[in-house]
Amino acid sequence: MKIDFRIEHIDPLGQGVFKTEGADPESGEIKRQVTFIKKTLPGEVGTAEIYSVKKGVQFAKLIEITKPSPERQVPECVHFNQCNGCDYQHTTYEKELEYKKLALTRHLFKFPEVPITIHGAPRRLSYRNRIQLHYDKKKKLLGLQDALMQIIPVPNCLITAPSIAYELRALYAENSWLNLLAKEPPIGHIELYAKENDKREGHNVQISINRNYANGGFTQVNFEMNEKLREWVKKKADQVIPAKAIVYDLFGGNGNLTAKFRNTTLVVDKYRTPPEANGHQKFYSCDLYDKSAIKSLIGLKTHGIPRPNWLIIDPPRSGLKNLHEFLAEFKPDGFIYIACQATSFARDTMPILKNYELQSLELFDLFPSTQHFETIGIFTRRKLNE
């Protein structure tokens, strides 16, 4: 069904919001209908087509803008209007950051007011070092899925780093990707993954077929912003964490965030084989989502590993729902929480605000052109007499 719309505002997911009110024909009750329309801007008027209705709200695909916003610009990527990978190329990067800051403010509306510092990216395009593409051999389709789960080919995707973009074009050339899938299922996915910051075309790209996401080992998708984040975390750690304090780096992977710390650090994550100790860093394999995780960390004391004074916590998108249990057990002087989902940040840290104070709040834009960003908070333990 097609509808005419006028966008009221942008929601925290980067979608335009259109609201209507009307009387129910049978009951006479006034009902409000909310419709979300991606790739629109406040004040814009146009037409869209409803494709889904969930829990009383509608989702529509943009058909035409009849009255564009002054903020609107022509997207650089030719795939933007059809592709579901990017959300903000129809406006400037400055406006994108404003919308992201507003989104974070809305997610944290129950928190004490703390100024948000924005850390923008040096480039909006040509940064992503990993991309996962869906394929359908029968339909000869390879690409990203749209809101209807249809595969949209993206041979000229502009968000990918140069090395990935080169391999991407090569896969699409004469459908050469089909040659890689002769013995693969008819439907699946391909991942292109640059493990190092090598900007040369055709270099250093791993191709995985029907394997887990980040099969080559997890790293941040934006090398430049990852380095900016690492430097910021180190600088803040030097300011707030005493030199002799013991740090546990939870969900630390290869020790990325704490690699340059001065503190003795235990990096904890689920490893097949833990990395070897590296200077101030030691590594311990533990599934932090397992019910026995806290007990396992407590047991390290018998192996000569002291309890932590500070925590660095950088969980996956799902967050750490039982953060309060870790804090209740270890009672650290403070912790730095890094979340790639603002909703997870809010859910996990809200319950601990009685015991810990949010000192600073940062928005790191590791995912330009998309709705996503990293939220970082520094928390310190409240004094007993507060």
Image: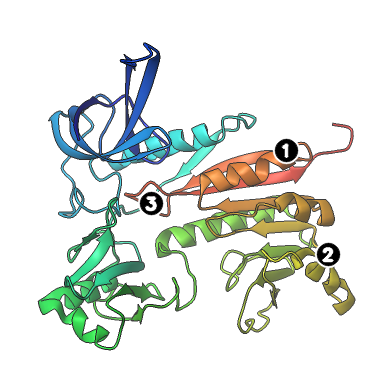
Report which residue position mark 2 lands on. 307
Q: Residue type at mark 1?
A: Leu
Kindly identify the residue that appears in the image at 60 percent across and 33 percent down.
Answer: 114
Q: Is residue 173 left or right of residue 182?
A: left
Distance between mark 3 and mark 2 Cα atoms: 36 Å
Q: Residues within 10 Å of mark 2 (few under 14, many from 20)?
A: many
Instruction: Find numbered disc 2 in the image and state the secondary structure of the residue it sits on.
Output: loop
Kindly identify the residue that appears in the image at 20 percent across and 29 percent down.
Answer: 3
Front disc: 2 or 1: 1
Q: Considering depth in this image, is 365 or 349 the residue closer to the camera?
A: 349
- Disc tally is 3
Kindly identify the residue that appears in the image at 84 percent across and 67 percent down.
Answer: 298
Instruction: Find numbered disc 3 in the image and state the secondary structure of the residue it sits on.
Output: loop
Q: How is this picture coloured?
A: rainbow
Q: Quadrant of the C terminus?
A: top right
The image quadrant that residue 206 belongs to is bottom left
Q: Residues within 10 Å of mark 3 (few under 14, many from 20)?
A: some
Q: Earlier in the sequence, mark 2 or mark 1?
A: 2
Report which residue position mark 1 lands on. 353
Q: Residue type at mark 3?
A: Ala
Distance between mark 1 and mark 3 Cα atoms: 30 Å
Question: x, y percentage for residue 311?
Answer: 71, 57
Q: Residue type at mark 2?
A: Arg
Front disc: 3 or 2: 2
Whether the residues at callouts 1 and 3 have beta carbons within 8 Å, the answer is: no
Question: x, y percentage for residue 256?
Answer: 56, 68
Q: Earlier in the sequence, mark 3 or mark 2?
A: 3
Report which residue position mark 3 lands on. 121
Q: Is residue 365 left or right of residue 344?
A: left
Vertical relation: 142 (above or below) 54:
below
The image quadrant that residue 254 belongs to is bottom right
